[in-house]
Amino acid sequence: MEREKLLAYIKPRMPQKRYDHTLGVAETAIELANLYGEDAEKAEIAAILHDLAKYEDEEEMRVIIRENGFDKRLIPWGAEILHGPIAAYRAKNELGIQDEDILNAMHYHTTGRVGMSHLEKIIYVADMTEPNRNFPGVERLREIARTDLHAGMRACISHNISFLVSAEIPIYPLSIECYNDIIGVEK
């Protein structure tokens, strides 16, 4: 799909700050895809669409989860976790995107999972390190991501898990599984 059509589709679904974030994720995803020999067009599509469901009603998202065979572990979680799978669902059913790698990159961009593809890692890392992000340690994550994709993913999932633990926020099971997988692979 054309970039401008995708941007027109997502813009009314989010506040300007989130739209700016999305543009930053797309810019970063394209850069990382080019750096690591991945398909930059697929990275751009996944990045533009990754947050399209972020501001949807949580109960409506749960209805989609229940009625469409999603992992039932999603049901008690809020929009922070639900919006990834719902974004992928909408991209497939409303925009006709059939590429499983794009859809998976959208689905797992907040949680990660075991056995992530390079595109999935690119979108996860780009979401955390795009230029509008400003949190302690983000510059270090950016540097690592531009040196080695797998090390960048390891640093990002480690940072995310550490943040959630220190803030005493529950951690979605796939994120723990992803962390264990990435740490195991990287030893």
Image (cartoon, helix red, strand yellow):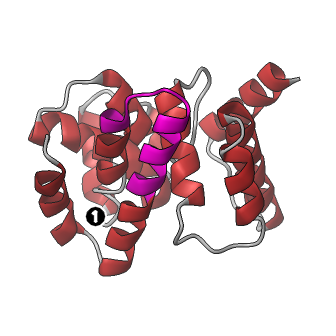
The image quadrant of residue 52 is: bottom left
Which secondary structure lies at badge 1?
loop
Is residue 99 toward the left or the right of residue 113 in the image? left
Q: Which residues are magenta?
A: 25-42
Q: Nearer the viewer, residue 187 or 73?
A: 187
Left or right: residue 155 versus residue 128 is right
Indicate left or right for 183 with 93 as reference: right
Tell me, yes or no, whether the highlighted magenta stretch contains residue 26. Answer: yes
Looking at the picture, how far across and down is residue 161, in whole percent? Answer: 75, 50
Task: Name the residue at the right extreme.
Answer: 187
Residue 179 in percent (x, y) is at 73, 35
The picture places residue 102, in percent across and down from the top left corner, at 34, 32
Q: Which class describes the residues within 10 Å of circle 1: few (<14), some (14-19), or many (20+)?
A: few
Disc 1 marks a residue whose amino acid type is Asp
Q: Quadrant of the C terminus?
A: top right
Q: Say whether residue 95 is magenta.
A: no
**Image quadrant where one finds the N terminus:** top left
**Residue 181 lies in quadrant:** top right
**Does residue 68 appear in this view?**
yes
Q: Residue furthest bottom?
A: 16
Question: Which residue, given by chain and number where applicable, does mark 1 sit on?
Answer: 57
Q: Does the image show residue 73?
A: no
Q: In the image, what residue occupies the spot 71% across and 40% down?
A: 147
Image height check: is 162 above or below 86?
below
Q: Residue at x 77, y 68 (%)?
A: 167
Q: Quadrant of residue 12?
A: bottom left
Secondary structure, magenta segment, majority class = helix
The count of marks equals: 1
- At x 74%, y 29%, the residue is 182
